[in-house]
Amino acid sequence: MKRLLMMFICGVLVLVACGQSSQSHAPRDFPDRTIEIVAPASPGGGWDATARAIQKIMTDEELTKQNITVVNKPGGGGEVGWQYLKTKPPSTIAINSSLLLSNNALGLSDLNQRDFTPIAILATEWISLSASKKSQLSSGKEVMEKLKKDPKSLTIGVAPGLGNNDHLAFVKAAKHFGVDVDQMNFLVYKSGGDLQTALLGGHVDVASTAVSEVKEQHQVGKLKILATTSEKRIKGLEDVPTWKEQGVDMIFPHWRGVMGPKNMSKKERKYWNDTMKKVASSKQWAEIRQNKDWDAFYKDTYASEQFLNQKQKEYKQLIKDAGF
């Protein structure tokens, strides 16, 4: 009897120990630590604004029980922040843009979209072609016709460097029109403000830049926007035709998105996919987009992956066409 009692007690102890062991190794809810949102730039810019908007919406909408911090990692056109992301757990995400692809295509970075887990494309700006109000140029088509006859006949201003979206959008439009694109005459300025000053002063014939940088000047009559890379005419610029309306069959977004470290589990990827979908559909995000002249351009994690892979091929070809 004593022997049976001892065996029973031992069995109970084993079961309790097993239960405690299984509880201690039970999977925790994700995320199970402080969330970091990496802005790969200094405070105050577009990447930083995007990161802080996500932080605020996630907090206000109670999309996580964890604390959320924004970490600024400026340098290398996003390189420093994205290298930092590679070392972090799946509770860390980072803002990305076309520079992730163009830096790689230009040979400035070994990183590309396959080094990360795409989570979402959240919004886009559109790119414009502008001229001085004093200029005789009246349309994007007229600019391209002139360049087709002589690729060096006009100076084209861009900032802050060749290989960015503003430059490549113009290259793509010119290529579609049959211009000898590697012969075109680009002038590079340090900032959008410097470029705008040069355009107003007649130091460049046209400028390729984000719509938000020249929209107000167009509305007050100091500059004239000749074309935009959007699919349809932009609110507030209903008088400006798209490139498509002028015979150049292209749409060219200047997008911003979110990505995480490589090799996320299905559960982790699903959490971030669901969370960013809620962020992108919130009233706060709509207000932020409107205030910053960003258009809705949401793509979920799997659509983002396809989008980035397709854009990588496009950027490599455009950079090759541009003569790099």
Image (cartoon, rainbow, N blue to C red):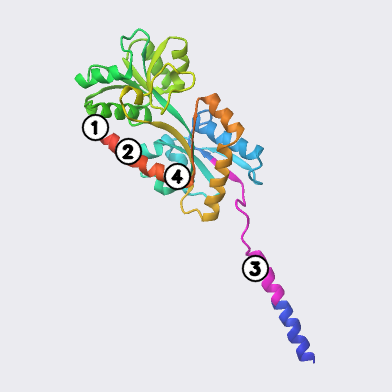
Sort mark 4 into few (<14), some (14-19) or many (20+) by Cα contacts within 10 Å. some
* Discs 3/2, front: 2
* Discs 2/4, front: 4
* Disc 3 to disc 2: CB gap under 8 Å: no
Magenta highlight range: 15-37
* Discs 1/2, front: 2
Q: Which residue is farthest left?
A: 149
Q: CA distance from mark 3 to mark 1?
A: 61 Å
Query: Is the residue 250 above or below the residue 6 in the image?
Result: above
Label 3 vs 1, first from the N-terminus = 3
Q: CA distance from mark 2 to mark 4?
A: 17 Å
Q: CA distance from mark 1 to mark 2?
A: 15 Å
| Residue at image mark 1 | 323
Residue type for callout 1: Gly
SS at circle 2: helix
Left or right: where 313 falls relative to 23: left
Left or right: where 48 falls relative to 227: right
| Residue at image mark 3 | 22
| Residue at image mark 2 | 314
Residue type for callout 2: Glu
**The N terminus - image quarter:** bottom right
* Disc 3 to disc 1: CB gap under 8 Å: no
Q: Is residue 21 magenta?
A: yes
Position of residue 100 measured from the top left corner of the image (x, y, whole percent): 40, 39
Point out which mark residue 303 bears: 4
Q: Name the residue located 63 percent from the left edge and 55 percent from the top edge.
A: 29
